[in-house]
Image (cartoon, grey):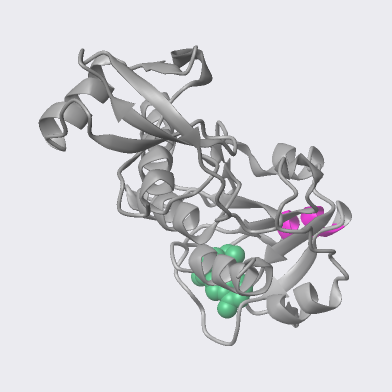
Amino acid sequence: MAQLQRLAIALSQLENQQITLTGQQQHYLYRVLRLRGGDRFMAMDGSGHCWLAELGAIEAVAMIKEEIFTQSELNIDVTLMAALPKGNSFDDVVRQSVELGVYCIMPVVSDRTLLNPSSQKVERWRRIAVEAAEQSERQIIPTILEPISFRIAVENCQQKYRYICVTRRDARHLLDCLLESGIEQQKADELPITNYQSIVIAIGPEGGWINEEVERAIEFSFEPVSLGNRILRAVTAPIVALSMISGIFDRG
Ligand code: SAH
């Protein structure tokens, strides 16, 4: 059923095996995709459930046919803590990180961050995350948190395994750290993901972290890690880090 279009819905739209479609969803299904009554699509609630649904005789309602059980998630709960790069390039970071299986994105404002995030930006990133999750056939829609300062993010960090990507330091390679971490992988059928082991990976802005930021992170149990011998752009580094993580924690 991979060819069926995916559509994220809110649980509040679901009642008695019926989905009440919003005006925007109706527009998308009927006008953009040109589906019609009787056509099917996949509805996902963003937290692990997916249903085969069928458009009804009236445009506002679709019927649930059956729940579909799929496995497309990493078996680790990974948060990307990323300093905001300038311009709109965080759009790409969000899209590609969602494709690679991130669970949560925490945009942070660091000392050398150039961008002052607006609330419209956050809404935009959330829409991008929904679209990317639909197209990548994710079971969940990753959370995009409100931007906060790096200092506060580090202090309030909940994840058990914490890494900060640093350049020009004698740091161990992320891959080695992950392989030697003893992080247990959960079994494939163990949703909800709240039981998963959690890791956070912090990536700096174009100008890099300042020393105090790295020191502070270390104070809060972050391990400095390398992504290799070449300096990557701020938008490339999250993708490389998440690719390594998904190489280990994909369920295959
Ligand atoms: N001019 C900065 C480059 C920053 S690159 C410097 O020389 O440090 C932006 C961020 O990407 C960095 O803060 C770091 O978190 C990450 N990054 C880029 N290349 C990396 C590498 N090879 N190893 C680890 N982290 C890297």
Using the image, determine if residue 184 lies above or below residue 217: below
> In the image shown, does 224 or 28 lie closer to the viewer?
28
Q: Where on the picture, by quarter, is residue 158?
A: top right
> In the image shown, does 74 or 212 lie closer to the viewer?
74
Question: Which of the four quarters of the rendered structure image does ligand 1 lie in?
Answer: bottom right
> In the image shown, does 100 or 188 lie closer to the viewer?
188
Q: Is residue 246 magenta?
A: no
- Find residue 191 and report its horizontal and vertical position in percent: 71, 44
Q: Where on the picture, by quarter, is residue 184?
A: bottom right
- Find residue 104 and report its horizontal and vertical position in percent: 60, 44
Q: Is residue 216 magenta?
A: yes
**Which residue lies at the image location 62% right of the left edge and 60% below the top edge?**
209
Specify the farthest residue to the bottom: 229
Using the image, determine if residue 167 lies above or below residue 190: below
* Total numbered circles: 0
> In the image shown, does 86 or 42 lie closer to the viewer?
42
Residue 35 is left or right of residue 200, and the answer is: left
**Which residue lies at the image location 21% right of the left edge and 12% below the top edge?**
58
**Which residue lies at the image location 75% right of the left edge and 79% below the top edge?**
171
Residue 117 is left or right of residue 175, and the answer is: left
Using the image, determine if residue 103 lies above or below residue 63: below
Instruction: Give the magenta part as a residue range.
Output: 212-218
Assign the magenta stretch its main secondary structure.
helix
- Find residue 5 and report its horizontal and vertical position in percent: 30, 43
